[in-house]
């Protein structure tokens, strides 16, 4: 910031300062504003004019993104807000994420300022205190009730009307009478913290020798008070959560805040119950389904250091922590950590960056670590602690492959004879089963038997999925929905619709038909109305009110059901379809996690995997329980192809409402592509999902050798082309999806 002598009136020169203010908008950098008098410190939240609007921004420091402006042309800051300033580490994190993702810094700031209402002061609580040196005026009547109130307040801190009534029995009339006489004064108190302090004297369950060793490593990392990344690699059911709970305990004893990231916060019911059992209180929770009032209280409590532990989805990484001392990324391999809208980022990788900038430890926990994480361990960038065995008497489940070419299901069914038989035996033994199919709804495709017409989404390049329980067809990309029309819109034949392929509802229908006594429930993201619904279902399963769970990938993450002994995978090949770089890795991770739900207590578990590809490396590794062999083969294949983590990828996505303008912009970018040794740019070409939410899409794929500065090259390349009207050009560094 610069000092200057200026004012809006040339005849009235006053001292003023110029400051840079970053606004939560997709602008190239901070803007200059004038501050009469003393300039606010970097990180201060201020209200400023922008055209006809008033916006809240942050006084910024660091490298200037724009050249300075003549102070006489600047507008004044309107107001300085009474909110905790955005810490320097948060500002550097925003700058780093913006540079890495090739995004506008203001777009990243918008994620950190997701609750503007939290920047205004909280409503203070009215309380009353005894007035100093008060003497009763002439005619004042000292009743027993008044005397009790005065004695209470003379001996202690200010009390709220409710507290006064509770301790003395005096009502509002007594208090107002004392105020009128000058005996009491009204004071405003800050609201109490919405989050209780965890009980650090409480102890968790007895740990196994392997857990004790792992715990020592994590506690030591927290105690060193510096950056380190540690992978907590343990098989399903090995007690990883209890281990990093001990690291949380260590951070809390040092009066540091803790952030725990979960891939899907709606699935956190059991996690939250375990945390409360361990620490005696519930943590702060952060996700998109919170009410505005809760988000406001939580955001402010985090900024003021009054939220000791926060558990949240990926967006929690951008909360303004006052004294962060530990980050835990649970299920670090999960693709849900990648945001693919607005600012494209991977919360797992950005958590490592945030820990590095804040000089604090980060724990990456998983039973199936990503290949990138495994390679970082091998290269010495991350440490690693192992939990090779399940807790107690539990053993890893037996995994068997069911070759659907040899033992297919009966016509019209989806459970093969071996799976049908295993399910009958499980139910007869009074145990529980899980049938897994990673496909929501009743059927993924509905077509006309007469002409072959397929019902498609008008806004996306996708078929409509039938949800028979809800009597509608839905697009899982944009949410478009309609009821099944009686006539085919193409040939107008009546009632000629055919449901093709199974979804979880169709599997549930089969279970209801062939196992009528079994109490079955569907567990999918569209059948859960938030965390409370998930908690209720988990309670039902634990209470043995459910015999068969039929679920999608939401059931694969972290759930512990002691009586669940059978897992049946309906279509194990589903994730291998298409040319996704990580298809094999993701399928292996998902099936391993699903299989891990079986036999987690004293009852042995069994897993039956239905597949048309039993010879595929994913299936053979799963059956043999040989994760390391699979990773070694996958690593060798990626290295030969120069693919991540042995090479770099980026995507450039061009989208807009008019296909011709999108194509013209994409081709203009293609003609001006940079030609640099070690970097190849493929495209442009229509995206596999060429229409998404009403926007036409074209893509480039940038492939580079390790060590290449992709971001600067892409930033300069994209900046040289002026996109068509309403056309948006987005950059995805390290893409996870190629659709």
Image (cartoon, rainbow, N blue to C red):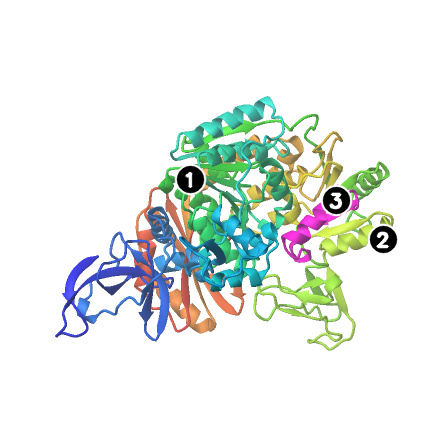
Q: Is mark 1 on a helix, strand or loop?
A: loop
Percent across and percent down for residue 534 are: 67, 50
Query: Which of pointers 2 and 3 lies earlier in the amino acid sequence?
Result: 2
Q: For mark 2, what is the residue?
A: 513
Of 648 and 173, nearer the camera is 173
**Numbered label attached to residue 646:** 1
Residue corresponding to mark 3: 541
In space, the residues marked 2 and 3 are separated at their CA atoms by: 21 Å
Dot 2 lies on which element? helix
Spot occupied by residue 688 in the image (x, y as percentages of width and height): 53, 59
Percent of width and height locating residue 348:
47, 44
Nearest the camera: 103 or 151? 151
Question: Which mark's residue is nearer the viewer, 2 or 3?
Answer: 3
Tell me the magenta residue range.
525-551
1 and 2 marks in contact (CB < 8 Å): no
Distance CA(mark 3)–CA(mark 1) = 43 Å
């Amino acid at each position: 910031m610069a000092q200057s002598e200026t004012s809006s009136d040339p005849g009235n020169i006053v001292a003023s300062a110029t400051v840079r203010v970053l606004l939560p908008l997709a602008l190239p950098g901070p803007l200059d504003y004038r501050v009469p008098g003393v300039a606010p410190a970097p990180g201060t939240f201020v209200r400023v004019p922008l055209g006809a609007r008033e916006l809240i921004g942050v006084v910024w420091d660091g490298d200037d993104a724009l050249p300075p402006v003549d102070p006489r042309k600047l507008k004044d800051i309107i107001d300085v807000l009474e909110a905790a300033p955005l810490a320097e580490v948060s500002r550097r994190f925003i700058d780093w994420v913006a540079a890495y993702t090739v995004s506008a810094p203001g777009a990243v700031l918008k994620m950190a300022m997701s609750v503007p209402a939290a920047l205004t002061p909280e409503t203070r609580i009215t309380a009353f205190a005894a007035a100093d040196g008060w003497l009763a005026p002439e005619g004042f009547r000292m009743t027993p009730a008044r005397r009790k109130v005065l004695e209470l307040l003379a001996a202690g801190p200010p009390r709220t009307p409710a507290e006064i009534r509770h301790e003395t029995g005096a009502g509002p009339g007594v208090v107002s009478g004392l105020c009128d006489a000058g005996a009491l004064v009204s004071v405003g108190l800050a609201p109490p913290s919405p989050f209780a302090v965890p009980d650090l004297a409480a102890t968790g369950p007895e740990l196994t020798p392997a857990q004790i060793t792992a715990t020592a490593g994590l506690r030591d990392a927290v105690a060193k008070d510096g950056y380190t990344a540690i992978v907590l690699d343990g098989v399903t059911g090995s007690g990883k959560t209890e281990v990093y709970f001990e690291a949380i305990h260590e951070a809390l004893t040092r009066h540091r805040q803790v952030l725990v990231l979960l891939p899907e916060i709606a699935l956190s019911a059991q996690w939250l119950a375990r945390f409360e059992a361990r620490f005696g209180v519930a943590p702060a929770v952060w996700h998109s389904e919170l009410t505005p009032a809760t988000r406001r209280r939580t955001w402010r409590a985090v900024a003021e250091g009054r939220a000791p532990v926060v558990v949240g989805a990926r967006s929690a990484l951008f909360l303004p922590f006052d004294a962060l001392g530990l980050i835990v990324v649970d299920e670090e391999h999960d693709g849900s950590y990648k945001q693919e809208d607005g600012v494209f980022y991977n919360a797992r990788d950005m958590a490592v960056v945030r820990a590095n900038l804040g000089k604090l430890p980060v724990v990456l926990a998983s039973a199936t670590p990503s290949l990138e994480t495994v390679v970082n361990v091998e290269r010495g960038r991350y440490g690693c602690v192992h939990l090779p065995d399940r807790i107690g008497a539990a053993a890893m489940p037996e995994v068997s492959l069911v070759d659907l070419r040899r033992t297919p299901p009966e016509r019209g069914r989806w459970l093969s004879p071996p799976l049908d038989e295993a399910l009958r035996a499980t139910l007869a033994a009074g145990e529980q089963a899980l049938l897994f199919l990673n496909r929501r709804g009743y059927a993924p495709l509905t077509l006309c038997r007469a002409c072959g017409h397929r019902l498609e989404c008008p806004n996306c390049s996708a078929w409509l999925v039938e949800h028979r329980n809800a009597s509608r067809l839905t697009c899982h990309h944009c949410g478009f929905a309609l009821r099944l029309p009686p006539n085919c819109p193409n040939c107008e034949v009546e009632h000629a619709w055919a449901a093709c392929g199974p979804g979880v509802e169709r599997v549930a229908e089969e279970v209801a038909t062939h196992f009528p006594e079994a109490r079955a429930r569907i567990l999918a993201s569209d059948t859960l109305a938030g965390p409370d619904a998930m908690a209720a279902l988990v309670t039902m399963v634990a209470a043995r009110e459910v015999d068969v769970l039929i679920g999608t990938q939401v059931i694969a993450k972290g759930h512990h059901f002691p009586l669940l002994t059978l897992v049946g995978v309906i279509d194990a090949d589903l994730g291998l379809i298409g040319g996704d770089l990580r298809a094999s890795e993701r399928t292996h991770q998902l099936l391993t996690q699903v299989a891990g739900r079986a036999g987690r207590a004293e009852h042995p578990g069994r897993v039956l995997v239905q597949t048309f590809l039993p010879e595929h490396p994913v299936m053979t590794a799963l059956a043999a329980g040989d994760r390391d062999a699979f990773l070694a083969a996958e690593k060798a294949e990626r290295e030969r192809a120069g693919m991540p983590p042995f090479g770099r990828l980026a995507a450039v996505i061009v989208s807009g409402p008019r296909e011709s303008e999108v194509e013209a912009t994409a081709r203009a970018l293609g003609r001006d592509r940079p030609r640099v040794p070690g970097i190849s740019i493929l495209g442009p070409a229509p995206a596999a999902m060429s229409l998404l939410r009403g926007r036409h899409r074209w893509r480039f794929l940038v492939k580079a050798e390790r060590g290449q500065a992709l971001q600067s090259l892409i930033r300069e390349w994209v900046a040289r082309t002026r996109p068509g009207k309403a056309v948006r050009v987005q950059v995805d560094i390290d893409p996870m999806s190629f659709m």
